[in-house]
Amino acid sequence: MRFAPTSFRPAFGRGLSIATAVIVALGLAGFVVDGDWNVVVRFSWPLLLLAALAFALFWFPRVDVAEHEVTVVNVFTTVHVPWPAIENVDTKYALTLTTADGTVTAWASPAPNRYAAQAGTMKDARLAAEASGANPRPGDLPSTQSGAIALVIRSHWEDLRAQGLLDAGPEPGSVRKEYHVVTIAVVAALAVATVLGVLL
């Protein structure tokens, strides 16, 4: 059966990004209404930097699980991990894929706090144990952010292994990393403008 692509992006992060954008917009509007254009020019930059960081940290990061690879979109990088390159899936601190080229940690799927872990049901624990082994971590529980992603990845990974599709192993350099040049440039430019606006 063909694998259905899945994308994981925390709803809380998107809500926080929108809330931050609204606060920034209200702050900028307040500067304009006040009519002091010197203040607008000097102190709008910190608000814009705050909005840019909120979107970089909480809106854009996600994990895409596709038929041929797992794509981890972090704050400043995107890493493409083909299925044969995955050696282990861990959730100790966040969803982490171990490959021959190193580890790839997903910013969008941190491990749960102890309260979220304690809210897991017996069914969650059973599914986590089946997917990760006899002693699953709290971050393996399917009801948690990291556990839901890990369950999907491990299930498809095991299916591919059972079909012998991972026997050849990964091709050298198959794990690809891309830098978010635009995001880095925007954050850097706003940071410089913020410093100049405060000092000048």
Image (tube, helix red, strand yellow):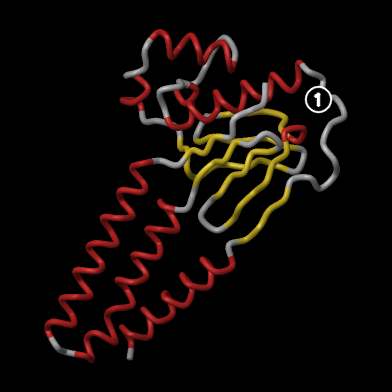
Residue 189, position as x, y percentages in the image: 47, 77
Element under disc 1: loop
Q: Residue at x 57, y 11 (%)?
A: 130
From this viewpoint, which residue is outermost toward the front? 1
Residue 200, position as x, y percentages in the image: 33, 91
**Mark 1 neighbour class, 10 Å CA radius: few under 14, some 14 to 19, many 20 or more:** few
The residue that mark 1 highlights is 165
Q: Is residue 46 above or below residue 153?
A: below
**Quarter-of-image position of residue 162:** top right
Residue 84, position as x, y percentages in the image: 77, 32
| Residue 28 horizontal side relative to residue 45, left or right | left
Q: Residue at x 16, y 89 (%)?
A: 36
From this viewpoint, which residue is outermost toward the left? 34
Report the quarter where the N terminus lies.
top right
**Quarter-of-image position of residue 164:** top right
| Residue 178 horizontal side relative to residue 191, left or right | right
**Quarter-of-image position of residue 179:** bottom right
Q: Amino acid at mark 1?
A: Leu
Q: Is residue 15 above or below residue 56?
A: above
| Residue 12 horizontal side relative to residue 75, left or right | left
